[in-house]
């Protein structure tokens, strides 16, 4: 082997080793963070039962004994699920429709202008979007649905949907663009219209990437803090008057609770430990979402018309 070949092989070995080290370091860092959060949160159950944490319907850490305090996961988890589900209902159809339009319908000139703008929206600071939600979306929701206050899960869902759409559009567009041209040509050769080819061939073939995009968008929504603090009202009580009532009234999310109270607690007390346990729950939810996204990405795409 020539000197150039030996040098190239040595360089490739160094690059491969660096990539391996970075990958292992990333995994180790995540494990260490999770271990730290879990270690700080578990002592809560020495003075507060696991059952109460999982089933209590209120979050009232300032209540004095014997009435309180209450460290209930349910109102926080319910708020996170409600706001995220609403954001998904709004964002997914709009984002996938926009991605299909960009990848399959829009002229290249339009695509070259619109896609960078959509990607740029993902860089807008969440606190700025929160201000827009508080100043525009909350009054609009209050007026349209004749509510006492616009701070609600509905307002939070609309704002989080706006934040999730750029992520879903960008990744879905890349997945659709990666479908081989032969798939489109084959559908036309078999007599399919353009829309039939898109809906029955292109979109199903890109489904793993689209699902992964949706999961990442959901992760963006469920992990957001500033927006939900500013537009949802942060009421830490589990409502019991129906889904629509819950959707149009104030809720408290896991991230909102941690963000609003983390700087107000005394180190080592029950409230401090309870916030770390909320962090553990959020970690688990995020891991599950990433796991589902990974399964979707590794799923073998369909290679034949059905």
Image (tube, rainbow, N blue to C red):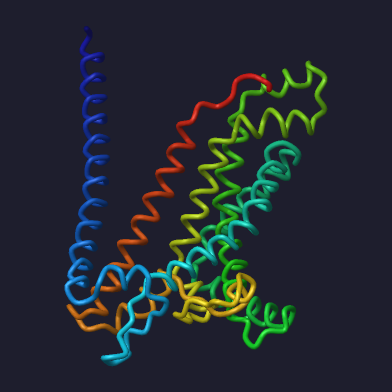
The image position of residue 113, as x and y in percent, is: 68, 48
Q: Nearer the viewer, residue 42 or 114?
A: 42
- Residue at the image position 57 percent from the left and 71 percent from the top: 156
The image position of residue 229, as x and y in percent, is: 47, 77
Q: Quadrant of residue 18?
A: top left
- Residue at the image position 44 percent from the left and 73 percent from the top: 75
Q: Quadrant of residue 120?
A: bottom right
Is residue 173 rendered to the left or right of residue 257?
Answer: right
The image position of residue 47, as x and y in percent, is: 19, 77
Q: Which residue lies most toward the top here?
A: 1
Q: Nearer the viewer, residue 137 or 177?
A: 137
Is residue 48 rendered to the left or right of residue 74?
Answer: left
Q: Is residue 231 above or below residue 207?
A: below
Q: Quadrant of the C terminus?
A: top right
Q: Is residue 128 above or below residue 181?
A: below
Q: Quadrant of residue 270?
A: bottom left
Tally of numbered tags:
0
Is residue 29 rendered to the left or right of residue 223?
Answer: left
User: Is there any visible trace of residue 132 in the rendered image?
Assistant: no
User: Is there any visible trace of residue 123 in the rendered image?
Assistant: yes
Q: Nearer the viewer, residue 247 or 267?
A: 247
Q: Quadrant of the N terminus?
A: top left
The image position of residue 45, as x and y in percent, is: 21, 70
- Residue at the image position 73 percent from the left and 32 percent from the top: 198
- Residue at the image position 24 percent from the left and 57 percent from the top: 33
């Amino acid at each position: 082997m020539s000197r150039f070949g030996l040098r190239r092989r040595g360089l490739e070995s160094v690059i491969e080793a660096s990539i391996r080290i970075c990958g292992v370091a990333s995994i180790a860092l995540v494990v260490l963070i999770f271990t730290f959060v879990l270690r700080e949160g578990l002592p809560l159950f020495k003075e507060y039962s696991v059952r109460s944490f999982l089933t209590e319907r209120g979050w009232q850490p300032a209540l004095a004994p014997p009435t309180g305090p209450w460290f209930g996961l349910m109102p926080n988890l319910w708020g996170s699920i409600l706001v995220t589900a609403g954001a998904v209902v709004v964002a997914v159809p709009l984002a996938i429709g926009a991605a299909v339009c960009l990848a399959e319908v829009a002229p290249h000139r339009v695509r070259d202008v619109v896609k960078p703008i959509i990607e740029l929206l993902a860089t807008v600071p969440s606190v700025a979007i929160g201000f827009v939600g508080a100043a525009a979306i909350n009054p609009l929701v209050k007026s349209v649905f004749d509510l006492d206050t616009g701070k609600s899960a509905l307002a939070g869902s609309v704002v989080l949907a706006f934040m999730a759409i750029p992520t879903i559009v960008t990744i879905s567009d890349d997945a659709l663009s990666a479908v081989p041209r032969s798939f489109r040509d084959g559908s036309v050769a078999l007599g399919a219209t353009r829309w039939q080819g898109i809906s029955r061939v292109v979109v199903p073939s890109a489904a793993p990437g689209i699902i992964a995009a949706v999961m990442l968008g959901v992760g963006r929504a469920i992990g957001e803090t500033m927006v939900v603090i500013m537009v949802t009202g942060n009421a830490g009580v589990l409502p019991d008057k129906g889904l629509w009532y819950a959707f149009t009234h104030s809720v408290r999310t896991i991230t909102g609770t941690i963000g609003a109270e983390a700087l107000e607690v005394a180190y080592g007390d029950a409230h401090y430990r309870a916030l770390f346990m909320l962090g553990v729950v959020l970690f688990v939810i995020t891991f599950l979402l990433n796991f589902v996204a990974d399964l979707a990405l590794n799923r073998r795409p369909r290679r034949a018309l059905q």
